[in-house]
Image (cartoon, rainbow, N blue to C red):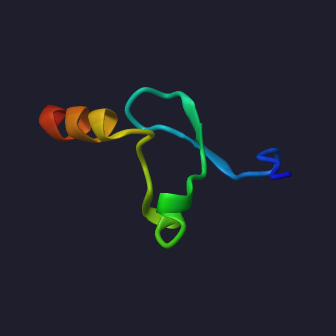
């Protein structure tokens, strides 16, 4: 059985909600700033 209890988490810079590590971010977790593609797009538009 696989437990997802001890995954690292961050706060999204756009929506300020917490989000957990995902396998797809394994290589670049340090650079991940947003919880979703939507938040990333919205942040880009506000600049």
Q: In this view, does 30 lie above or below 2?
A: below
Q: For the point 38% across and 39% down, which residue is it? A: 36
Q: Residue furthest front?
A: 1
Picture coordinates of residue 16 (x, y %)?
Answer: 49, 28
Check the image and report above or below for 20 versus 38.
below
Residue extending farthest right: 1
Picture layout, residue 27 above or below residue 13: below
Lateral position of residue 28 relative to residue 1, left or right: left
State the residue at coordinates (18%, 41%): 44
- Name which residue lies at 46% across and 68% down: 28
Locate residue 4 relative to residue 30 in the image: left or right.
right
- Left or right of 41? Residue 17 is right
Left or right: residue 35 compared with residue 8: left
Q: Which of the two residues, 26 or 2, is positioned nearer the viewer here?
A: 2
Image spot of residue 17 (x, y percent):
53, 28
Task: Count all numbered tags in the image, as a single digit.
Answer: 0
Looking at the rendering, in which quadrant would you find the C terminus?
top left
Q: Which of 2 and 41 is in front in this view?
A: 2
Q: Which residue is drawn at 77% across and 46% down?
A: 4
Q: In which quarter of the image is residue 23?
A: bottom right
């Amino acid at each position: 059985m696989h437990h997802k209890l001890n995954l690292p988490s961050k706060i999204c810079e756009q929506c300020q909600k917490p989000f957990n590590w995902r396998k797809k971010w394994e290589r670049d977790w340090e650079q991940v700033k947003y919880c979703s593609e939507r938040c990333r797009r919205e942040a880009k538009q506000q600049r």
